[in-house]
Image (spheres, rainbow, N blue to C red):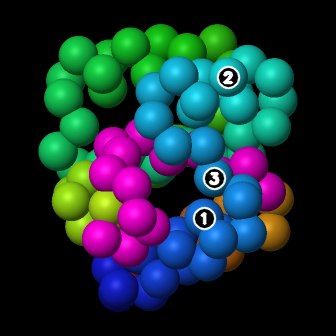
Amino acid sequence: MNEKILSFLGLARRAGRLSLGFDPAVDAMIHGRSRLLLLCNDLSERSRSKILKIVERTKTETISLNISMNEVGMAIGKTSGIISVDDEGFAKKLVMLCNDMTGGN
């Protein structure tokens, strides 16, 4: 199932609908462009803590992936542990794929 998520992230990247990295993701959240925030499983605790404080303030939906930064890098061409999905359609599809992976609804 990770392959489907990674493939879809690649599509979103090519469509220009992702903000990759801490600063671009924070900018997207603060300016209301971010529809979903994805965090890789090997993101440092310091970065995770800092971004989650901003998530609390902006109320951005967040999913912790069971995917590494290297896997993301191979799929989208840039290694990043923090990914903001800046499009409602892409965000909904990624939530659905993540729920399918975890067995959630």
Residue 28 position by quadrant: top right
Location of mark 3 (residue): 18
Q: Which residues are magenta?
A: 74-87
Does the magenta portion include 80?
yes
From the top left corner, tell me how far across and down residue 68 is, in percent: 21, 58
Residue 13 position by quadrant: bottom right
Label pair 1/2, CB-CB below 8 angstroms: no
Q: Pick the quarter of the image with the C terminus.
A: bottom right
Foreground pick, 15 / 48: 15
* Lower position in the chain sequence, tag 1 or tag 2: 1
Tag 2, which secondary structure?
helix
From the top left corner, tell me how far across and down residue 84 is, in percent: 59, 44
Query: Can residue 104 be seen by looking at this rendering?
Result: no
In the image, taking residue 18 as reference, residue 81 lies left or right, namely left
From the top left corner, tell me how far across and down residue 98 is, in percent: 46, 70
Tag 1, which secondary structure?
helix
From the top left corner, tell me how far across and down residue 9 is, in percent: 53, 70
Label pair 3/2, CB-CB below 8 angstroms: no
The amino acid pointed to by label 2 is Asp
Placement of 28 over or under 92, stated as above or below: above
* Lower position in the chain sequence, tag 3 or tag 1: 1
CA separation in Å, label 3 and label 1: 6 Å
- Which disc number belongs to residue 27? 2
- Which disc number belongs to residue 13? 1
CA separation in Å, label 3 and label 2: 12 Å
Picture residue at 32% right of the left edge, 61% below the top: 73
